[in-house]
Amino acid sequence: MKSALLAASATGVFLFGLSAGTAQADEGMWTFDNFPAAKVEAAYGVKIDQPWLDKVRAASVRLTNGCSASVVSRQGLVLTNHHCVVDCVQDLSSAETDYVQDGFLTTAREQERKCPGQQAEILAEITDVTETIRAAGAGLSGQAFNRARDAAVARLEQETCAGDDRYRCQVVSLYRGGQFKLYKYRRYADVRLVFAPEIATAFFGGDPDNFNFPRFNLDVAFLRLYEDDKVVETPQHLTWVARAPEEGEATFVSGNPGSTGRLLTVAQLETQRDLAIPMGQLQRSELRGRLIGFSEVSAENKRVATDPLFGVENSFKVFFGRQFALNDAAFMADKRAAEAELKAKVAANRTLARQIGDPWSEIEAAQAAYAEHYLPYRQIEAAAGSGSDLLSYARTLVRAAHERAKPNTERLPEFADGRLPLVEKRLLDERPVDKNLEALYLRFWLSKTREYLTTDHPAVQQLLGSQSPEGLADDLASGSRLDDPAVRKALWDGGLPAIQASGDPMIALALRMDPLARQVREAWETDVEAPTARAAERVAAARFAAYGDAVYPDATFTLRLSYGQVQGWTHRGRTVPATTTFSGLYQRATGAAPYALAPRWIAAKDQLNPDTVYNFVTTNDIIGGNSGSPVINAKGEVLGAAFDGNIHSLGGDYGYDGELNRTVVAASSAATEALEKVYGLTGLLDELMGR
Amino acid sequence: MKSALLAASATGVFLFGLSAGTAQADEGMWTFDNFPAAKVEAAYGVKIDQPWLDKVRAASVRLTNGCSASVVSRQGLVLTNHHCVVDCVQDLSSAETDYVQDGFLTTAREQERKCPGQQAEILAEITDVTETIRAAGAGLSGQAFNRARDAAVARLEQETCAGDDRYRCQVVSLYRGGQFKLYKYRRYADVRLVFAPEIATAFFGGDPDNFNFPRFNLDVAFLRLYEDDKVVETPQHLTWVARAPEEGEATFVSGNPGSTGRLLTVAQLETQRDLAIPMGQLQRSELRGRLIGFSEVSAENKRVATDPLFGVENSFKVFFGRQFALNDAAFMADKRAAEAELKAKVAANRTLARQIGDPWSEIEAAQAAYAEHYLPYRQIEAAAGSGSDLLSYARTLVRAAHERAKPNTERLPEFADGRLPLVEKRLLDERPVDKNLEALYLRFWLSKTREYLTTDHPAVQQLLGSQSPEGLADDLASGSRLDDPAVRKALWDGGLPAIQASGDPMIALALRMDPLARQVREAWETDVEAPTARAAERVAAARFAAYGDAVYPDATFTLRLSYGQVQGWTHRGRTVPATTTFSGLYQRATGAAPYALAPRWIAAKDQLNPDTVYNFVTTNDIIGGNSGSPVINAKGEVLGAAFDGNIHSLGGDYGYDGELNRTVVAASSAATEALEKVYGLTGLLDELMGR
């Protein structure tokens, strides 16, 4: 359930040089219908035309666990990052067979195994629905505004995709409400694992090197699309190239950046800086420590906690970078200046000024409500029990039972008909549940909820009664049977009567907390989200009026294209080259984790060409969610898979600095060499090379 | 080795109303030679004269582990908090006998047991040495400035206390260099534990209730002063009273507030807000999680981690409060306004302006060096291996071996002759060492050092070589014999030759890191501390010129007196009464920790008067280090022991708000009732009552 999967890291450098105004050279996560092709041609002398865009779009894949990918063969083969499938690799492993440690290799279709909960989506069509959505909310405020818009969204999604399981429709808000578009995706609900290297290979250097460069990671994996138990034919695939990237070569990244806050107002950035990020980081750090403590108890604990710990450490670094970007006074001064410039442009035009009003002050006013509601909303609704699959199952079952009984347009938006197939898939796919790890998550959540809301808060009283967080958590984890998919299926099919008759303690907890959780959510949506959304649309309108479409929308985990080139960087007089090679990997290996080589790589050392380009960096502007994105040259060929950002891209949530921000890529040259000489997977290599 | 022991807590309230200018009603941690007696008489109609001050001072005790206390009988009996002796209680416990859980009760002198590392100090004399110190540093800068002043300090301390073990001398910087005073203490190096309640009684409500109010804690313990194995006669003791405090009654707190930052410039506060505090909190949170994970492994792990976990959680809450005070825009605006006012007063006086210059800009300029040096300084020197007793022993032994070979005035200040007795006592007193817990601290420190400095940092390379943090930590913890006091004694006595011949792996590590640690310390002192100290003295001079002695110095863990009254408070329309009673305790008990009553309290319920005042709050201005301070009425009688601050006092490091800030006190009325009816300690009670 990770959402920001792009690796980033914490270090001793706190200075960022991010732009706050309009897009600079190589900046931007552009939609495919507003790509600055002329600017790219002027900068790099390469032509990006409509057929190029159509071809790349048709081969670009969104993975619903929060990653990007691309189709790279005619038989539905999909390239992504190892860290995008590690949850699947972990789910397929057991105490006896640890694919995370040993790698997952297949040499025949029947060895390929379904990834639980995973769905692949390819964008087929975009329709502008701005007017319809705007009209639905006109004249309304607060919860009524939210619900009217949710209903319009549910209706549009249902009308366009209804009754055809092969498609998924989703209304997307761009430019923070400046535009609304209906995205129609071709949906593939059967995604199977083909190849994943050992974690020691994919994540060599581990958390300490995460987001540093030079890097030496085969953070690459392959999946395959299936439908009706047959391989999906994919003539629209990208071409794999085995050659190394060239310095200065133009590169394009097509993927789904998850979320950015580049268009947030200064008041919103301050709330992130002073409240939301620090709160998240403090809890994340403690959870990290608890998971480390858990891992140290036994080899089996260490195995089951590998992926969760990676997720927490990765998020920690992402937010560490964000925090220190926002703590930088010069950066905030730039943001203030850009906001003042935009306000001045509005004030200078009387008609515009009347139309826009002062949405900045409205957003600032909503920050007090944000501070007031944030903790209850976080602990009881938004991040309740985060990490516990059992609680997540129970809450989904209880909510769905209530919501599915209502007409489509009256439901909470995540239970609208158009969204139910993925909800159901995630709920019912079989996945292993470790009861000890479940208990850890629940103890953590319940104790932090009591700590931050205080013992006397009504929600805490209702959750705990006279029990301790530790006692209740252990009872819930050991007593619940929701780890059995058949039990979940029965409760899903049985609806509210089955839920209410269930004696499962986790269902009982979810039933007990649901009214309160809905209440804090309603307060949050009414007092924070709705006024912010209505004001942000007018900020967006001001921006369009001032700068036209020379701006790009904030990232929304929808398909974007960024451009740039293969290039190192220079910081404080030190130049970091653009590429690393296999020889660097062997030099960096110490034998002690996370700098220990996998046995296959020790054995293959003499067979490998030491000069093979392993990882490289480009100036492309990407962010979490872009993990696994294909890095493409001007001919539309795949040079590798983006898997990280460099140290300076830490603040990329809020701005981009072309001098220093870099995308880190696992090169197809390295994957080609390794598949042949380390893994002996000549069949897979032949498929990639179209042989 | 905790230093800020006053409990405080984290909650969902982020607004503080702290004063940033000169002292307001009840504000201030005043030195005994500048107590605002006239102001107190005007406000409360009580006379505090010199005999009163002398008497209270002579009975006020500083405990060298970071707490305060008071002498309350003629036979050297000392009142403090349970949480000030819990480290001692833990040290005296074993897997078989857990005094932390069961309480430590004595009925005869020979059952009283020495607290390892603990020393009690009573202030005997104050001398102004400002001119001597100033003269020593005149015309110097950087490291030379530091060393010249250190030498002057060592000389003064040595001259005044030399050769008399009964005294300890310490030069104290007040008003951030505005004054220097030589404090001469009567020193008691043999402090024995007389009484400590069960932790369930002392810390009922645990971390969740820490710093909330109403509270129900017998956070009280008794020690006794010994010398030459005999009880110390203490005719200068305070009188214990069994009666409850009265609403509105004037109260005085005499103790040693540890550290405040009320006189810091805005630039310094911003560095605390944006760098120092967040860095500390993120590490502290992870350590907390690791300790919790460790505790969950076994009952013995839980036992040995009880005190460390309490320490980490307590510090977490203290800094949580500081962070959110500094994140409050209104509070920082007040600080900016106060600074601007002071600057304007300086600018308005030409002579003063010439004399003061612009120390604010100098301090601001030093913040870049702070940011640059902070992480190496923290990880390699200031907080290196924090929590590991073995590493602390090794570093002390290695440093001392080098420093003791130099003349007194040329040493690092902490190894000057005047300081050595306490260094030696702490090093050589016998204390239990848990090797598993040691390994945890070392793994944590080494892995965080690598994370924050990066794998390629020279210090990290030197510490780890080709080992992993986990592997090296486990080797060090299991291989070192420094847990044996005889081994430490031999190395202390043997000096550098013994150290260099030692095969102990921890000594080897300390030897390896010492040159690097000295180097980062020198960079820190030269580029950060020295320029800050020189500028801060001129800020202090400006403040004296502008406000005279209507200001009090920042806390420095030296004796202070604060005044106030017994009073509840009203916040957002809700009034919190000033007192709680035993009946409230029984109502709040759930049976689940930390709301479970100790068995003795369950048994005694019917014997106790339910209306006995248990805890109460006053308007006194205190901070961490004040824990255990006597709360005294106008007659000089003891009404209880201060043990906490309320939620609003969280930001007390930077300011005081008399409307909301409260000191939380364990009442002598409750202790009296409990000693008789719960613990049956009539002998102790007779001693307290002077019977």
Image (cartoon, coloured by chain):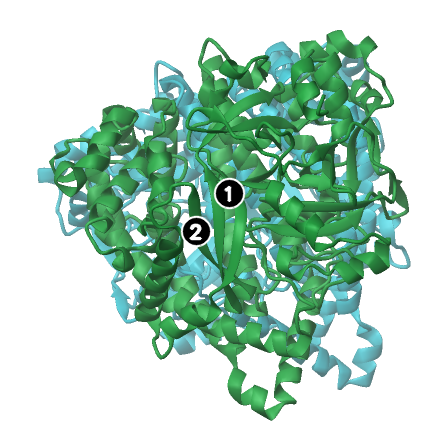
Chain colours: A cyan, B green
Going by the numbered disc 1, the residue's amino acid type is: Ser
B211 up-or-down from A56: above or below: above
User: Measured from the top left, where is residue A570 in percent x and y?
Assistant: 31, 69
Q: Is residue A13 left or right of residue B332?
A: left
Dot 1: chain letter: B
Residue shown at 66% from the left, 17% from the top? A472
B607 relative to A49, above or below: above
Residue B686 seen from this side: yes
Residue that mark 2 sits on: B169
Q: Is residue A378 visible?
A: no
Query: Quick one: B662 or A550, which is closer to the camera?
Result: B662
Answer few, some or many: residues within 10 Å of disc 1's Cα (few below 14, many 20 plus, some between 14 and 19): some
Looking at the picture, tell me which residue is in the foreground, A376 or A94: A376
- Mark number for residue B3? 1
- Residue A200: percent from the left, percent from the top? 29, 34
Type of amino acid at the residue the image marks with label 2: Cys
Closer to the camera in the image, B429 or A598: B429
**Marks 1 and 2 share the same chain:** yes
Taking the image as shown, residue B95 lies to the left or right of residue B45, namely left
Secondary structure of the residue carrying tag 1 is loop
- The image quarter containing residue B34 is bottom right
Residue furthest bottom in the image:
B350
Q: Quadrant of residue A660?
A: bottom left
Task: Say which quarter of the image contains residue B351.
Answer: bottom right
Which sits earlier in the primary sequence, circle 1 or circle 2?
1
